[in-house]
Amino acid sequence: MHRLALSVLLAAILVGPAAAEQDLLLGADMTSPAMTQAEMSRADIEAMIAAAHGKPIDLHDKSLSGLDLSGLDLRGANLRTARLNTANLRGADLTGANLQQAWFLKADLSGAKLADAAMFGITARDANFSGADLSRSMPIGDFKGANMRGATLVDLRGGADIRNQSMGLMRAVFTSVNLSGANLKGADLGRSRLEFANLTDADLTDVVLMGSDLSGANLTGATVAGADFKNVDVSGTRLIGLKGEDRARDWAARVNIDRAITQAAH
């Protein structure tokens, strides 16, 4: 069953429109044991970690939903296609982990270390990444509704690569994501979906936003010095109290500038 769900997920990421995203929920049985139950216990995984003597453990394609894995050392772990829906990964170390095509629906990764993690095809809708470190990770997947408040996303590699798009546009989906106060210095979010994202007081210094969709997003108080706004859709976007606006790149090349909100309502 879960392989069908994975194929639907990839279709949603590749195609992008809302209809494809809805198909993700329609095409996968989210109530099945593969999506809601765990085939291993925390003790089982702790034993694997101990036996590995510091080497990465292999949990690919495992059903781990609902498990308490908080604080575990999962550096470099292979979690490709694993299901960790609603799992507790608070403070876990997933540095350099392979999370490609893994499921993290409503999982708690607050304060987790995810630097350099591979996330192609991941789905982490409504997951909690508050205070987490995703520096240099590659989140080409679906994070719709996730909480990334105060997260570190320095040098994030979430931009779409148009040089190899034979299957469609693969991009980061950050629709309605809470990125308030997040550090995104140097991140690549070119051609990403950021509709209705909360970016209040976020640090967007030198961020590549070229061709992304920021419609309805809130950038109040955000730092935008050096950020690339070429062909960025700002329809309904709140651009109030920005810091470093005079140093933003291609500021005049935004799309739907006349529809942006530049003054606070009185």
Image: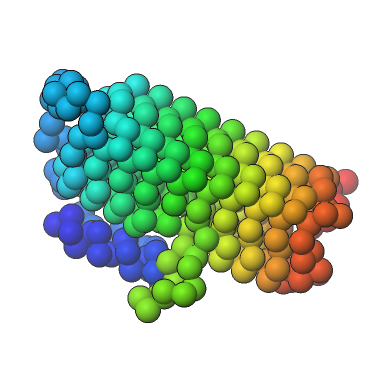
Tell me where residue 93 sits by quadrant: top left
**Placement of the N terminus among the 4 image quadrants:** bottom left
Q: Eyeballing the image, is 119 above or below 148?
A: below
Which is nearer the eye, 103 or 135?
Answer: 135
State left or right for residue 67 relative to residue 187.
left
Q: Eyeballing the image, is 166 above or below 138?
A: below
Which is nearer the eye, 27 or 71?
Answer: 71
Q: Eyeballing the image, is 1 above or below 95?
A: below
Q: Residue at x 88, y 46 (%)?
A: 266
Tell me where residue 19 sits by quadrant: bottom left
Which is nearer the eye, 246 or 233?
Answer: 246
Q: Position of residue 239 (x, y in %)?
A: 77, 53
- Residue 126 appears in view: no
State left or right for residue 156 relative to residue 124.
right
Figure label count: 0
Q: Position of residue 26 (x, y in %)?
A: 28, 62
Q: Residue at x 24, y 42 (%)?
A: 78
- Residue 246 appears in view: yes
Q: Position of residue 252 (x, y in %)?
A: 81, 68
Q: Residue at x 57, y 42 (%)?
A: 154
State left or right for residue 155 relative to residue 240.
left
Q: Residue at x 62, y 39 (%)?
A: 183
Q: Position of residue 189 (x, y in %)?
A: 57, 57
Tell me where residue 164 sits by quadrant: bottom left
Here the colouring is: rainbow
